[in-house]
Image (cartoon, rainbow, N blue to C red):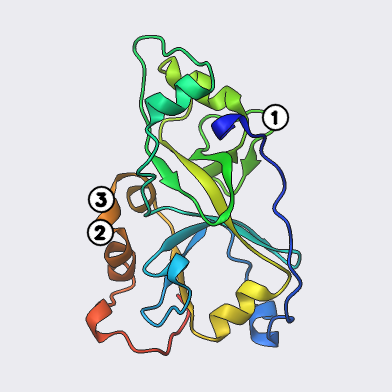
């Protein structure tokens, strides 16, 4: 999609198996991950990630609180030879993660779907086809959406291990957090939904 690159399946990296406790828990597709203050990887410091898929095969998600400073939606449409048709709509372009940063993924409400869409849950879906951008540019498409370039990916058991090592909190997602909260305040807003003040947050974590 973005920069004329085609979307593809996330590559998987091998990782240790998850703990028994996490295997007994529900998979976290449709929830958000909230980086702990102790996050060691600078690429994910104070990030909020919407998990599009989480299974024994691994996990894939989109960072939803990092803007794409170098590219606007109008510029992206120009690159893709899409001419907006009034009443044109504009959506946020965000940095979705460090993997395949030229590939575009539209995270959106599930009121609009096509054959290639991934239905995450009853409320949300993911589409990597250029068709969704054409619909949005014409004023149609899903009710709420954002465009992410790149994604975050984990191999089998890797995310489970990181959660047990207190790198992440997980919490239910909601539309306001995903689409309307100010990007610069989204990490704190996600923690607030768990009743957590980041200034008081220690390096230990429970699960939502």
Query: Which quarter of the rendering shows the C terminus?
Result: bottom left
What residue sits right under mark 3 in the picture?
Answer: 182
Badge nearest the viewer, 3 or 1: 3
Which residue is drawn at the image coordinates 47% and 60% (left, top)? 49
Horizontal side of 10 relative to 1 (left or right) equals: right
Contact? badges 3 and 2 (CB < 8 Å)? yes
Badge 1 density bin: few <14, some 14–19, many ≥20, Cα 10 Å: few
Farthest residue to the top: give it: 86
Which residue is drawn at the image coordinates 70% and 75% (left, top)? 157
Q: Position of residue 162 (x, y in %)?
A: 57, 79
Horizontal side of 150 relative to 179 (left or right) equals: right
> For the image shown, how many numbered marks are present on the structure?
3
Residue 192 sits in quarter: bottom left
Q: Position of residue 67 (x, y in %)?
A: 36, 48
Q: CA distance from mark 3 to mark 2?
A: 5 Å
Q: Nearer the viewer, residue 7 or 79?
A: 79
Q: Is residue 140 visible?
A: no
Horizontal side of 80 relative to 136 (left or right) equals: right
Q: Position of residue 173 (x, y in %)?
A: 43, 57
Farthest residue to the front: give it: 70
What residue sits right under mark 1 in the picture?
Answer: 115
Q: CA distance from mark 2 to mark 1?
A: 35 Å
- Label located before the other in sequence (2 or 1): 1
Q: What is the secondary structure assignment of the residue under circle 1?
A: loop
Badge 2 density bin: few <14, some 14–19, many ≥20, Cα 10 Å: few
- Name above or below for residue 67 compared with residue 198: above
Which residue is drawn at the image coordinates 46% and 65% (left, top)? 43
Q: Nearer the viewer, residue 8 or 191?
A: 8
What residue sits right under mark 2 in the picture?
Answer: 185
């Amino acid at each position: 999609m973005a920069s004329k690159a085609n979307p593809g399946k996330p590559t998987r990296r091998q990782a240790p198996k998850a703990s028994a406790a996490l295997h007994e828990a529900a998979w976290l597709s449709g929830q958000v991950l909230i980086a702990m203050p102790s996050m060691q990887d600078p690429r994910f410091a104070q990030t909020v990630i919407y998990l599009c898929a989480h299974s024994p095969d691994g996990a894939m998600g989109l960072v939803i609180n990092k803007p794409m400073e170098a590219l606007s939606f109008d510029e992206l449409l120009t690159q893709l030879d899409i001419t907006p048709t009034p009443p044109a709509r504009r959506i946020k372009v965000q940095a979705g993660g460090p993997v395949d940063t030229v590939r575009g993924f539209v995270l959106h409400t599930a009121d609009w779907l096509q054959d290639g869409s991934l239905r995450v849950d009853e409320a949300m879906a993911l589409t990597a086809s250029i068709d969704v951008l054409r619909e949005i540019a014409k004023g149609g498409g899903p009710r709420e959406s954002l465009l992410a370039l790149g994604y975050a990916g984990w191999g089998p058991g890797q995310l489970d291990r990181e959660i047990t090592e207190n790198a992440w909190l997980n919490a239910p997602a909601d539309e306001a957090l995903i689409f309307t909260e100010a990007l610069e305040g989204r990490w704190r807003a996600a923690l607030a939904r768990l009743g957590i003040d980041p200034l008081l947050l220690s390096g230990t974590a429970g699960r939502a």
